[in-house]
Image (cartoon, rainbow, N blue to C red):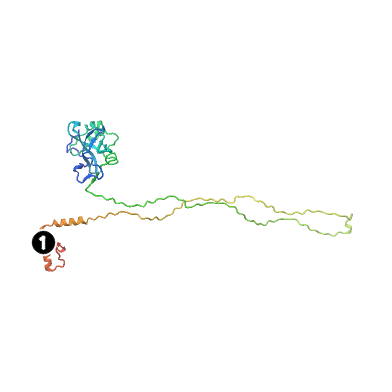
Amino acid sequence: MPHNNPSDRTSTQALIPLSKAEGYRVAENNEDVRGWDVRGNDGEKIGKVNDLLIDTSADKVKYLEVKVDRGLFGKDRNVLIPIGTARLADDEDVVLVDAGKDALSEYPDYTGQQITSDYETSLQSRLTTGAGATRGTTENDRYYNERGLFRGGREAALTDEREARVTRSEEELQIGKRSVQAGEAYLRKTVETEHVRQEVPVMHEEVTVERRPLSADAATDVTISEDEIRVPVTEEEVITQKRVVPKEEVVIRKRAVSDTEVVEDDVRRERVDVDDSAVRERTSQTRDRGRSAGQKLGDMADDVKDRIDGNPASRPGPDATDRR
């Protein structure tokens, strides 16, 4: 059992009861569990929530201060239970904790003393070993889980009344790109007929007749009769035929070309204007009320003097000449 002496090694966190924390309260629309019954993991009542210990450095509840029923141990006891090991019942104002009677018997007493590192180390050891061990939670979860407070759907968040907050928002232009079909390019073959005219040289044979005179004594055996001679005459004739031959190949391909487009739109943003003129005026009045009676009498005398000597700056009450 640790020594609960204020001279013990102190914690690095500022832990104070919510009932004594000036400016803090349970946030609107959240649950203030002080005074609620506390039930253990066996469903039996073990006490009531007496107070909440808050970590002012994080503005969060860290411990439930539970006043244990006298019947459990035969005496009055207050213990601290980490907020992460508790949840709120769904349909009634009851706090459910992982601990039972056996676990609470090992928890160190809390009597309102300053929380020290030794105290938290002792409590932490009870949460990890022995009857007080909690199930399924890490050391961080025992204090601040994802929701920051109780497990389950209901919360009990804190708010700091010493400050007021306004969220300033603005619209941002989200620009994206998508591919759309801008058209299509295609190749198409058609058949067309062209009349071709070409000159082709050709050869042909022609017949010429040559007559030669003969002397009377040149022929030795000459008779008169009918006769004929046939001489074949030839010529070149043009023959045409067609055949298909490849002439060229046409290729179509795509390429990406970068360009720039200007996008314009109107976006809204909030502006926060601070008007503290009323505060400054009250501060000025308070400061003026704090002036001594001697200063006020001196100002009155100066006003009289200003009216006598005709000072153009004269006016009732303090003026610039009164401060010279």
Residue at (11, 62) in percent of width and height: 300
The C terminus, quarter of image: bottom left
The N terminus, quarter of image: top left
In the rendered view, would you say 75 is above or below 274?
Answer: above
- Picture coordinates of residue 63, whole percent (x, y): 23, 39
Task: Examine the image and state in which quarter residue 119 appears.
Answer: top left
In the rendered view, would you say 101 is above or below 56?
Answer: above
Residue at (19, 42) in percent of width and height: 19
Q: Which residue position holds label 1? A: 298
Which residue lies most toward the front here?
91
Specify few, some or many for label 1: CA neighbours under 10 Å numbering under 14, 14-19, or 20 or more. few
Q: Nearer the viewer, residue 63 or 219?
A: 63
Is 174 displayed left or right of 321 in the figure? right
Residue at (19, 31) in percent of width and height: 71
Residue type, numbered disc 1: Gly
Is 216 displayed left or right of 31 in the figure? right
Task: Examine the image and state in which quarter residue 76 appears.
Answer: top left
- Picture coordinates of residue 313, whole percent (x, y): 16, 66
Residue 12 shows in the view: no
- Picture coordinates of residue 104, whole percent (x, y): 22, 33
Q: How many marks?
A: 1
In the rendered view, would you say 44 is above or below 212?
Answer: above
Q: Nearer the viewer, residue 197 or 184?
A: 184
In the rendered view, would you say 112 is above or below 233?
Answer: above
Mark 1, secondary structure of its residue: helix
Residue 278 shows in the view: yes
- Picture coordinates of residue 95, whole percent (x, y): 25, 37
Task: Examine the image and state in which quarter residue 51 appears.
Answer: top left
